[in-house]
Image (cartoon, grey):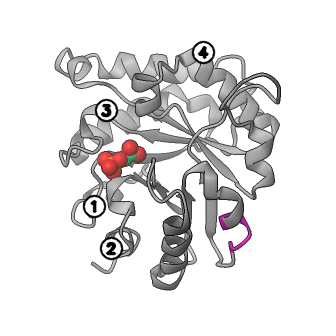
Amino acid sequence: MQIFAANWKMNFGGDDGLAFFEELKTKLKIKLNQQIIICPPATILRELGQSLDLPNLYLGAQNIFYQDQGPFTGEIAAAFIKEANCRYVIIGHSERRQLLMETDDMINQKIKAALKHQLKPILCVGETLAQREDNQQRLVIEAQLQEALQGIPKELLTDLIIAYEPVWAIGTGLSATATQVRSIVKVIKEALLALGEVKILYGGSVNGDNIKEFMAIPELSGALVGGASLKAASFESIINWEEE
Ligand code: PGA
């Protein structure tokens, strides 16, 4: 099964997002062996959740909080997201780790909250440029995985998706090379051997031109796409990579 997730980030949060979703539904040619996960801003999740009328098209949230309810101003509980008809949730995106000081411990708690409410986590891991220049990427990824999944029984993690997103490749137009991705995919596979088949995505400046190289990596299931998911034509060129 190929998985392509669209991370809209803080774009298309209102009527523009509703219209774009309708446009995507008419323009995307989703294949039987594909799952497309649209992750819009939380403000329109519920409305999109009511018009999920295409096979293999799913909704994901970009974040949740780890408490179920209470005095957490501005936060959104997993149960709210679940009720909006979301199936997936992105957890630990590097923008949240860096800009909002999200820690591995918070990420661990968020994964637990997602699982408790039957949401499938898309856990983002990735090294910074300084860490790669220091050749620390392997250690960084192993530590992020270990801390994010700490204390979670492996039978709960059958639907876990890992997105390898090197921080230096996100939104920069400078994607990782297939060789770099392949070697980190191997690290992830080894670290999570006990979980069996874990789905792994690559994210970081994915577009219709480079997707083919990434899809040639046998252990990779697909991509988490930011910028190129904001136009129907460029997202379509990614999910339609076999024909390009
Ligand atoms: P990008 O973003 O495709 O714009 O690099 C990817 C992501 O942040 O998930």
Q: Which amino acid does label 3 sit on?
A: Val
* Marks 2/3: CA–CA distance: 24 Å
Label 4 belongs to which residue?
A: 105
Residue contact at pointers 4 and 2, CB within 8 angstroms: no
**Residue at disc 3, secondary structure:** helix
- Residue depicted at 48% across the width and 21% down the height: 144
Report the magenta residues as a range: 48-52
Q: Which of marks 4 and 2 is nearer the N terminus?
A: 4
- Residue depicted at 65% across the width and 57% down the height: 45
Residue contact at pointers 2 and 3, CB within 8 angstroms: no
**47 vs 88, nearest the viewer:** 47
When asked about the image quadrant of residue 38, the answer is bottom right
**Where residue 156 sits: x, y (%)?**
76, 35
Q: Which of marks 1 and 4 is nearer the N terminus?
A: 4
Residue contact at pointers 1 and 2, CB within 8 angstroms: yes
Residue contact at pointers 1 and 4, CB within 8 angstroms: no
* Marks 1/4: CA–CA distance: 32 Å
Could you tell whether 15 is left or right of 133 in the image?
A: right
Q: Which amino acid does label 1 sit on?
A: Asn
Q: Does the residue labelled 1 lie within 8 Å of ligand 1?
A: yes
- Residue depicted at 53% across the width and 56% down the height: 13
Label 3 belongs to which residue?
A: 167
Most common SS among magenta residues: loop
Q: Quadrant of the C terminus?
A: bottom left
Label 2 belongs to which residue?
A: 237
Q: Is residue 102 magenta?
A: no
Could you tell whether 75 is left or right of 11 in the image?
A: right
Q: Earlier in the sequence, mark 1 or mark 2?
A: 1
**78 vs 119, nearest the viewer:** 78
- Residue depicted at 67% across the width and 28% down the height: 110
Q: Earlier in the sequence, mark 1 or mark 3?
A: 3
